[in-house]
Amino acid sequence: MDPALDVIVVGGGLAGLTAARELGRRGRHVLLLEARERLGGRTWVSSFAGVDVEMGGAFVHWSQPHLWAEVTRYGLGIVELPEAERAFLRTDDGIEEIDPDAFIDLAGGFERLCAGTEAYLAEPMSIPEGPDAVDADLATTAERIAALDLDPRRRDLLDALCAALSSAPNDRVGFLTIARSFALAGFVGKMLFDTNGRWVLEGGTATLVDAIRRDLRADVRLGTRVEEITQDETSVTVRTTDGAHVAPAAIVALPVNALGAVRFDPSLSEPKREAAEEGLVSLGVKVWAKLAGGIPSMFGAAPDRFPLSFVETVGPTPDGGSVVLGFGPSAEALSPDDPEPVAGAIEELLPGARVEEVGGHDWVRDPLAGETWASYGPGRSLRWLPELERREGRVAFAGGDFARGWGSYMDGAIETGLRAGREIEAVLS
């Protein structure tokens, strides 16, 4: 074993950072391995059009308990995003202007869609049980929307909202993904908007990543990709592109869709292997664009049969333009690496807008991610979640993809990092 090494943490996103911090503060000697040349994983602030933008996770809320504890711990601030002055909906008949409060007015429709979730998600920070939960898991979001008696406009708005929440077409997502978001918002439609797009960290998520990094008592090695993890009754060996490291225990903090790139001996359990091979269905896209000046703040929405589900201006650029954020259900259909189609999709949703620059990161084609955030296909959430979090021997697992509560959010990553750290401390003790 490496001299005095207690734990190897694989993955430097928020889950891995949290686990490494907690174990280091307990006096454990921790080695943190990260394949990228930066920490944060899918939490990443980068520069675009002269301003800092969030390439990955961004939105925060005080109802997210683990994240809010970090905000309090490090004295971080939050900022409310501005409301749009004009709003548009794209349908098969073209583009129409709607009331800017249309999404808030849609809260009632969303509550209808999620009616009955209190019965099986009364404790949304746990994995639900019972026949109603199973039915919600097996159904697709598209099927649940189709079952509602809605006018075409409200149906298209609801379709757009759900696709944006899932980062996937609604016919590919198990409805339990949407139901959990509603439950975590207190079973209140309006709160869903507050928890998914209204508040961000002051200074960006880099403030949180940097705060945890400064708090680490661990050896950190960037640019180190893990290829194989083997274990026996007394130790874990982690083989990387730069050599091997041995410790009494390890934590693997990787996205589900990237888990298959690491060889495990003994092999992972069958459900874990199945999840890694089949993958999560959140294969959407997050794009940024710079618009020429002279337009008001706007947002546009479209159902999931269009390339972008949601587009919104979020602030100015130094030269008087505007920065736009957009979400689409399929990175295969629309990639930030292909600027012309992205510009066209944005201009179709925001009348009068002229795109001058396009940016973003293709998380789906990123081999260290393979996905945006966690959405499960029909019948997969209840099958995989309990197993993905289960420790195997001396190896524990962490990641926002399989948090019991705010899965796919930063809060969920922190939650699982805390849990994995506690499990490994018990192994070492």
Image: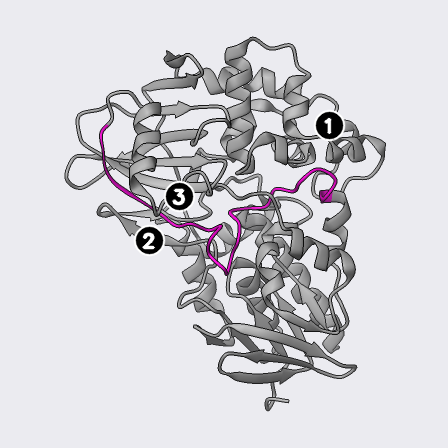
Q: CA distance from mark 1 to mark 3?
A: 35 Å
Q: Residues within 10 Å of mark 1 (few under 14, many from 20)?
A: many
- Residue 213 pos. (x, y %): 45, 66
Three-letter code for the amino acid on which mark 1 is drawn: Thr
Question: What's the magenta bit mostly, secondary-structure-wise?
Answer: loop
- Disc on the earlier residue, 2 or 3: 2
Q: Residues within 10 Å of mark 3 (few under 14, many from 20)?
A: many
Residue found at x 57% / y 74% = 227
Q: CA distance from mark 2 to mark 3?
A: 18 Å
User: In this figure, which residue is indicated by the disc labeled 3?
Assistant: 335
Q: Quadrant of the N terminus?
A: bottom right
Say which of 2 and 279 sits in front. Answer: 279
Three-letter code for the amino acid on which mark 3 is drawn: Ser
Query: Is 178 within the magenta?
Result: no
- Disc on the earlier residue, 1 or 3: 1
* Viewer can see residue 25: no
* Viewer can see residue 56: yes
**Camera-nearest label, 2 or 3:** 3
Residue found at x 71% / y 43% = 381
Q: Considering the numbered disc 2 on the image, is that residue within a helix, a strand or a loop?
A: strand
* 257 shown above or below 106: below
Question: In the image, 227: left or right of 39?
Answer: right
Task: Tell me, for residue 46, which label it has, or none.
Answer: 2
Q: Quadrant of the C terminus?
A: bottom right
Q: How is the image coloured?
A: one colour
Say which of 135 and 365 sits in front. Answer: 365
- Residue 405 pos. (x, y %): 66, 44
Task: Tell me, for residue 117, which label it has, or none.
Answer: 1
- Disc on the earlier residue, 1 or 2: 2
Q: Considering the numbered disc 1 on the image, is that residue within a helix, a strand or a loop?
A: helix
The stretch in magenta equals 354-381
